[in-house]
Image: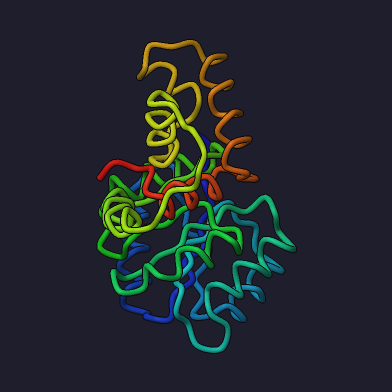
Amino acid sequence: MEIVRIIIADDHVIFRKGLRTVLNEITFIKVVAEASNGNELLSTLKTTEVDVIFMDIKMPGMNGIEATEKVMAKYPDTSIIALTMHEEVGYFNKMIEAGAVGFLLKKTNKDQLENAIKAVVAGNTFFAEEFIINNSLSANTKPTLNIKISDKEKEILEYICKGFSNAEIAKTMGLSQRTIDGHRGRLFEKTGAKNAPNLVLFAIQNGLIKA
């Protein structure tokens, strides 16, 4: 796998250094810079090429939501993974709307970090499983929209929420990729989602993911 260039944007220097140490243990990762807030990140991006940004949400000066919007407007090929504490998961909607394609809790481990990076550089999404479970439980109290989604489509939706590619879903379910492509397309049509993060957000908000 080609080297993936990473920037860590977080206002806590100890957390940044710790995350950098863990990421540097992954052979295909190169942490090219750190930033303590959104303004510093945007300044860094003027002279530094990057593939993935780990974005803290609560930062002084310019927070992660605003920084994500600005980064995606100017550097649309960059993948942003939000980093958050348990009590900040309410920012999920805003980060997805801003353009983030991944969402990890700060207590994440090395394997999950590696899986998240692989998923987003491949053009997929990645959301911490414990986050999806917690939010699907609360989402179940909300009414589901009046649309019909088959059991197979729900199963595929769960895999999409876990960051699986269409090829991986096809292999796991024993179906052709063409079949998965068709189901995925119908999910977008039925939900009105414009992209995979929007589809995940819809699934959580409407209790379509099994806890």
Residue 60 in sight: yes
Q: 145 or 64, which lies in front? A: 145
For the C terminus, the quadrant is top left
Report the colour scheme: rainbow
Q: Is residue 15 left or right of residue 55?
A: left
- Residue occupying the point 37% across, 29% down: 155
Q: 18 or 145, which lies in front? A: 145
Q: Is residue 205 left or right of residue 40?
A: left
- The residue furthest front is 146
- The residue furthest right is 74
- Residue occupying the point 44% across, 79% down: 58
The percent position of residue 81, horizontal first and vertical second, equals 48, 57
The percent position of residue 179, horizontal first and vertical second, equals 53, 15
Q: 14 or 59, which lies in front? A: 59
Vertical order, 137 against 18 (above or below)? above
Q: Is residue 95 left or right of residue 43?
A: left
Count of marks overlaid on the render: 0
Vertical order, 29 against 56 (above or below)? above
- Residue occupying the point 46% across, 32% down: 149
The percent position of residue 166, horizontal first and vertical second, equals 50, 25
Residue 25 in sight: no
Q: 8 or 86, which lies in front? A: 86
The percent position of residue 68, horizontal first and vertical second, equals 60, 67
- The residue furthest bottom is 61
Vertical order, 52 against 94 (above or below)? above
Q: Residue 171's image quarter?
A: top left
Q: Residue 45's image quarter?
A: bottom right
- Residue occupying the point 53% across, 67% down: 94
